Image: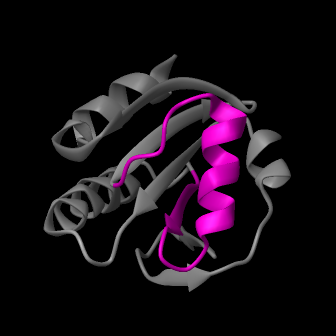
């Protein structure tokens, strides 16, 4: 299941397929693991980014909830699965990605400018 954080930072669960994300001008896709402490730290960074940049849709893929979609993301992007992991997308093209401690507000803010 993909989750989208809206402007007031509440988690609103919206089921989407990847085609919706691919068509957006800019978007953030975050792979999150509910069992990984590093993932919670990365999630905090993604939420801070979302609060600072409410115009950019941020989607969270909880890997335990949808392993098949997680595999599909790896195939589509050509980037090996990790979690936590973030992708910055422009019209469906990955312009930046990182994982673990590399998931930061700064990475997302710099990458979204492009």
Relative to 33, 17 lies left or right: right
Nearest to the observer: residue 66 or residue 26: 66
Relative to 92, 100 lies left or right: left
Q: Residue at x 49, y 68 (%)?
A: 63
Residue 88 lies in the magenta stretch: no
Q: Residue at x 47, y 22 (%)?
A: 113
Compared with residue 28, is residue 3 higher up or lower down, i.e. above or below? below
Q: Residue at x 26, y 77 (%)?
A: 35
Compared with residue 80, is residue 68 higher up or lower down, i.e. above or below? below
Nearest to the observer: residue 90 or residue 97: 97
Residue 37 coordinates in the image, percent (x, y): 15, 69
Relative to 66, 20 lies left or right: right
Q: Quadrant of residue 10?
A: bottom left
Q: Quadrant of residue 68?
A: bottom right
Image quadrant containing the N terminus: bottom right
Compared with residue 14, is residue 28 higher up or lower down, i.e. above or below? above
Residue 98 coordinates in the image, percent (x, y): 35, 34
Residue 26 coordinates in the image, percent (x, y): 63, 37
Magenta span covers which residues? 57-83
Residue 59 coordinates in the image, percent (x, y): 56, 60
């Amino acid at each position: 299941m993909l989750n989208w954080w809206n402007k007031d930072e509440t988690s609103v669960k919206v089921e989407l397929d990847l085609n919706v994300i691919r068509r957006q001008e800019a978007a953030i896709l975050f792979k999150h693991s509910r069992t990984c402490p590093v993932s919670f730290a990365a999630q905090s960074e993604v939420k801070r980014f979302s609060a600072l940049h409410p115009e950019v849709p941020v989607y969270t893929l909880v890997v335990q909830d949808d392993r098949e979609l997680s595999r599909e993301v790896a195939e589509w992007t050509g980037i090996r699965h990790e979690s936590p992991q973030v992708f910055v997308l422009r019209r469906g093209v990955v312009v930046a990605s990182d994982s673990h401690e590399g998931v930061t507000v700064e990475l997302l803010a710099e990458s979204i400018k492009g």
